Amino acid sequence: MVRNLRMAAARVARSGAAPRMAATPAARLGAVVRMAAVAAALAGAAAPAGAERWQVQYFYDKSKSTLALVDICFSSATRGVAVGQIQEKHRHKPVVLVTSDGGAHWLEAEAPGQPLSLFFLNENSGWLVTTHDLWATDEAGRSWRKVPGLPSGVVRVLFTDERTGYAAGSKKKAYKTEDGGQHWEAIAAAAEPPGEAKYSAYDWIAFANPKSGMITGWNEPPRLYPQQFPDWMDPAEAISRYDTPHLSYNLVTNDGGTTWKAQSASLFGAVTRIRFNPEGRGLGLLRYANSFRYPAEVYKIEWKSGKSETIYRDRRFAVSDIWLSPDGTAWLAGVVAPGQIRNVVPGKVQVLRSRGTDYTVWKAIDIDYRAVANAVLFAGTDDSHMWLATDNGMILKLGD
């Protein structure tokens, strides 16, 4: 695992003439989005005919309301589910989007609760974690039934078969079930790493195969002198604020969850994604604060040897998700950072791909000019069936 990263010195953004913007915050944000879209359109205008391209399949484009997608899963080349929340003024409506034709058409329905994450075991069987409950489906997301007994604070689940599953949650808690989620047993090793439980959580689960898996988390105590204003209100203070290391947690099993080994390391940033393919090759994603030199860093993991090494980082590319195809092809998705203060206004969505095993050559894949966002999510079954979901209500598919 990447560790002992040296803290980069904060840099003050270069000054320069800026276009005059509209007076209100909403108008300024709209102007920025429109400029990003125009720039993206110009950048993609020269794409050759027949080249691979990410094309829009679904776009929530309604006045006075927005849709933020928080997760997406495709269990086959035809069946997919996305979940999120529609916000209209002070009203919030959780939604589920379901497709049975590869994303050509999406059916919108109200979600049974505020969605946090999705997991699908096969084409029909899946689970939805909401803020308070666990829901299961046997109909590819068209209907959901409540699974009672989920411990409080769980944010994500993963099942290796219909009955065996794992859950990650707050307060340094992780769990295992052997009856399809009816009962959960705490994983004792999850409490072993140092750090107060109230400032700790596990939030990601990945299995290379039914026997070998990993649960990742973090411990991050509050700052002694918390920031007074959000980054967008005081950008000079945000980029001069030094990032501080905190503990990263790993729980590792090689016997199907019977035993777990706990590990911890001091890191800058947070491990937000781990992906494995059936061969045991893996990718990890570290995301950093605005004051750090890089917005994100991607590293490869050799499961059998336990070694890892950085394969990608770029000051202008804020990677928000990674994907590893069955053949080992690596994918990165995120947005082109508009400046050092990231996640304030949407940026142009960007996707990179690298084939082979060394991941030294990355190719940008053309994408629809309307694709601007703050965060992007991957879903897919293989290199021929890949999708993206954005936090502003857009779903795109890779095609010719």
Image: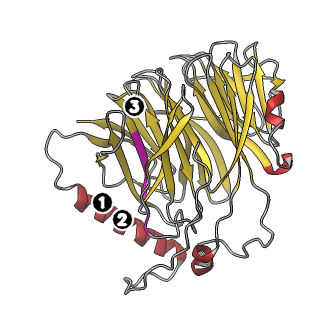
In this rendered view, identify the residue nearer to me: 333 or 324.
324
Amino acid at dot 2: Ala
Can residue 249 be seen here?
Answer: yes
Residue name at image x 50 percent, y 32 percent: 282
In this rendered view, identify the residue nearer to me: 398 or 165.
165
The crowding category of the residue bearing disc 2, from other C-alpha atoms within 10 Å (few below 14, some 14 to 19, many at least 20), is many
**Sequence-first tag of 3 and 2:** 2
Q: Are marks 3 and 2 in contact (CB under 8 Å)?
A: no
Residue 313: image location, x then y, percent? 44, 54
Q: How far is disc 3 from disc 1 in space, using C-alphas?
A: 23 Å
Amino acid at dot 1: Ala
**Sequence-first tag of 3 and 1:** 1
Residue name at image x 53 percent, y 59 percent: 64
Amino acid at dot 3: Gly
Say which mark, if any, is on residue 40: 1
Q: Vertically, is 138 above or below 334?
A: above
Q: Across the whole image, how many numbered discs are drawn on residues?
A: 3
Q: Vertically, is 142 above or below 96?
A: above
Image quadrant in which you'd find residue 381: top left
List the residue tagged with mark 2. Answer: 36
The crowding category of the residue bearing disc 1, from other C-alpha atoms within 10 Å (few below 14, some 14 to 19, many at least 20), is many
In this rendered view, identify the residue nearer to me: 178 or 280.
280
Q: Are marks 2 and 1 in contact (CB under 8 Å)?
A: yes
Say which mark, if any, is on residue 103: 3
Span highlighted in magenta in the image? 331-338
